[in-house]
Every structure is written in structure tokens, then in C-alpha cells.
Image: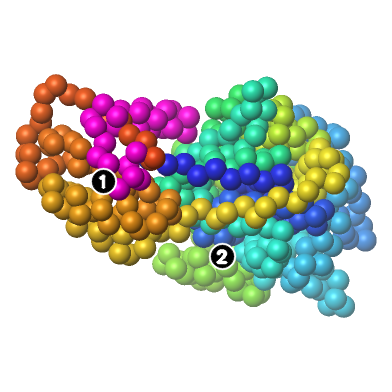
Amino acid sequence: MTHTDRARTDGAIVIGGGIAGLATALHLAAGRLPVTLLVAGPLGAGAATFWAQGGIAAALGADDRPDLHAIDTLTAGAGLAEPEAARRVAGAAPAAIDWLVSIGAPFDRAAGGALALGLEAAHSRRRIVHAEGDGTGRVVLQTLIAAVRANPLVTLLEGTSATALLTDAQGGIAGVAVRDMEGHAAELTGRAVVLATGGLGALYASTTNPLGATGSGLALAARAGAVMRDMEFVQFHPTAIACGADPMPLATEALRGEGARLFNDRGDRFMADIPGAELAPRDVVARAIFAELAAGRRVVLDARLKHVERRFPGVVALCRANGLDPLRDPIPVRPAAHYHMGGVEVDATGRSGLPGLWACGEVASTGLHGANRLASNSLLEALAYAGWIAADIAAAIPAGTPPPAAVPALPAPPAPALRQLMDRQVGVVRDKAGLAEAVATLAGAGDEDATRVALMVASAALARSESRGGHFRADHPHPATPTWHSRLTLGQVAEPGTEPEPDRVRRAAMTDDAERQVA
């Protein structure tokens, strides 16, 4: 890498394209704060939100209250969930659902028009809001994506991965070093950075997570010095579909809420005598299934329920895509890594211990989940903290901050003609005539970043009259002695007719090494 772009915004930088990142960006924009949203791939691709089947927990039923939701959360958290976090998040749930409805989320409705409410493990009431049966994550994600794309205050950088958090002299977070899919690097500085990068399930051989869920946001924060909390707590979903796929498709917990039952290959309903049976907390069900598997027995989920194809079209489609028919035969299942309860330690506003850094969603440890997440609290947590984070960032940035200049998108791929020139004359095999022609052409081709970088490559190749490693000169096919590092500056090579001397090019090589170390 020979060049790094730098861009500044007095707004916020949000890293991640799932529910946490999109909701945070929208709440920030609603407060008139410009947002730069970084997404590693195309928006929506690779987000675990897309795969969320069950729904979003919210105490909306006539027989339900937020305090009952909070109690269920604390019970599932096995002694480590924090009461204040549970109370606040459960209390925020109805408003979070209203917000999604206001931006167009088409949740399933019961007769009469009220939101349909499902039941999941360890919930004492029906409180799972869902869409298209078991398509909640996909539907919510599509709704958020449409809202983000329509919002002029959100600058979207797709195909852009964060490689490091930038720190200031006081150790606070001042921005993000990034790289796009073409390998181009940039530094984006801003007043606030929000990690919304998801979890780490793909570190396990059996997982329901996208294979990109390797804890990248955790690594970013840890390298910057953030405190990690409860890293040992990983939730294994009890009923991943054991069909040989990687990642494993999921048989949502809502199936068990509607009456699906677990059996071993001897026909025993082994959960029957355990408190809560199939609707016991996830860690309990996962351990019970694991014990059956360890004893050499196969475990299946009998989901041959009335209306299963209408209520759970996603699960039915996943099964059929993997050679299974859940309407005719029970589904083979096993536990798989599904959710990480630990993460970057944050306070009640999502703020980490590093000034300028917030975290939202699975990457954060808010105190809500404790040692075991209650089903369908993950999307809820992201929605609740997105609003609180946006409010905290708005308060942290002084009122009247002038709007920044537009944050430039990372450079587009260079023009085809430039790429063909480099292939042909500065490619695998080079010679003096071709390199000299390339230098002359590039020197007169303008001052775009790609052109300037190409000019430096060609100029240094022309100055090195030997072959070494990836640099092969047909007119000088052998390495020369003594060895030396090339040095050049852009100002030197941009002057037509100026050929860099060998000792001048060393500075570029040293700068390149330093950039790699920073990244």
C-alpha cells in the first residue's frame, strides 16, 4: 500500500450493517447528525440480523407487563444479568416496536389487527413480535435498509472494512482506518465511532452465524485498549438443523413455542421431566441435547404441527433445501454456537471506557444477557441501545457544530485504460522501454489518486535495474548487489523527465512498512 486517503467528519462513524448499525445510524440522523456508515460487503449481506427467525420480544399483550419481561430476562441470565439493564430494555421494547412500524416494518397481525405475539423458551407470556412467520430478521433488515438508503444524512460506504481504530494523543478514539474491497486504505476521522459489528459464532465449527462473524469488532476495540467483559459466555442454540451445512440452518425456538417436541432415536421425550420442558432456557435445552448426543443417541425435533408451513415458511424452505421434509419427518438437530453474551464493556448509554467509542448489539456487553440470553432479546437490545447511543453522542457533540463537508466515498476502481497499462507495462514481466512509456503516460494523465499511485510504482520499477522478488526486469533478469531500498516522493516522480535515484526511493518503502504496522 503506497497511499492512504484521509477524510474528516464532525459527525459519527458507525461500523456494521445489521440491525444495530442501521438503527443507530437512523437515530443519529434523526437528530440531524451526519453519519458515515461502514459496511464490509454489500448492505444487508453477511448480517446475522437477516437470519433471525424468532422475532423481537416486547410486552404488548393484555396479560403482560415490562416488569414481567425483565424478570424473565433476569431468570434466564443465570445470576449475571443486571436488573437495571433488564428493566430499561424491557421498558423500551414497546416504543422500539412502534418505531419499526413507523418506518414501515410489516409485522404479522392477529384477527382484529393487533400485532400477533408468539411464545419462546423461558418467556412467561406470549410477547414475540414477528414478520412473515419466521422471517422477522430479513423483513426488519430490509425495512431498515430502505430507510437508510433514503436518508440524506447517512453516507453509506459499502464494501469497506474497518482495519483499526484511530486514537488521539489522549488515548481517545478519533476515527477509523479502513480498507475497501480493492485493497485501498483510508482513514476516516470523526467525533464519535460506534461499533455494531456482531458476534463471533464463526469461530466454532458448528454455528448458525454467518461465516464472517469472527469477532472483528471485538478485535478492533481490544487492540485499542477497550475492556472486554464476560467473554467466556457463548450461547449455543439448541436446535440447529443437523444437515451437514456450514453454517447450520436454524430451527427457530418459536417452533417449540408452538408445540414442537424433542425426541431421541429411542422415542424418548427427554425434556419432559425438566422444568420448562422444551421451553426451558436455551442453555438447559442445549445441554440436554448434547448429553443425548454424547451418549450416542440421535436427537430430532418433531415439528409436524398444524399450519407449520404457513407459520414457519422459512424453516420449511431451509429443510427442503437440505433434503429434509419437516411436514413428513422430524428434523435432526444439535446445538450450535449462536450468540455471544460477552463483548466490549459499555455503560447504560452504550459508551465504552475509551472516549469517543460506543458499541451496540452483539459486540457490546451491556449487562442485559448475563450468562444466557433470553430468546428474542438480541434484536430488542440493539434497537433500545441504538436510541440511547444516538442521544448520548448528540449530547457529547456541542450544539451548533457546523455540518461537515460531504465525506468522500473511497476511490472507485481506476479506469480500465490505466489498469490495462499497468498490466501490460508494469506487470509480471517488465523492461526499460515499457516502463519508460508507462511513466511518461501516467505523468501526463492527471492527479487522481490511482494515477499518482501507479506513477510511483512505475517510476520505482524503472529505477530498479535488477530482478528481485515480485519485480522482474526482462532486460536485467538477475538480482544486483548490494541490496538497497528505494526512496521516492510523489513530488519527485510527478515532475516529467525526473527519474528517481535509488537512494531516494527508500522513504516510500519505509512509509509503506509504517502504514502496515499502524493498520
Q: Amino acid at mark 1?
A: Gly
Q: Amino acid at mark 2?
A: Val
Q: Residues within 10 Å of mark 2 (few under 14, many from 20)?
A: many
Q: For residue 497, which numbered disc appears in the image?
A: 1
The quadrant of the rendering that contains the N terminus is top left
Question: Which one is in front, 174 or 353?
Answer: 174
* Quadrant housing residue 84: top right
Q: Assign a secondary structure to mark 2.
A: helix
Q: Which residue is mark 2?
A: 315
Front residue of 518 and 119: 518
Residue at 29% of width from left, 29% of height from top? 504
**Left of 247 or right of it: where is 253?**
right
How far apart in space, not on screen, are marks 2 and 1 (Cα)? 67 Å
Q: Would you say 77 lies left or right of 52 here?
A: right
Residue 159: in sight, yes or no?
yes
Q: Earlier in the sequence, mark 2 or mark 1?
A: 2
x%, y% of residue 210? Answer: 50, 51
The magenta region covers: 492-519
Residue 130 in which image quadrant: bottom right
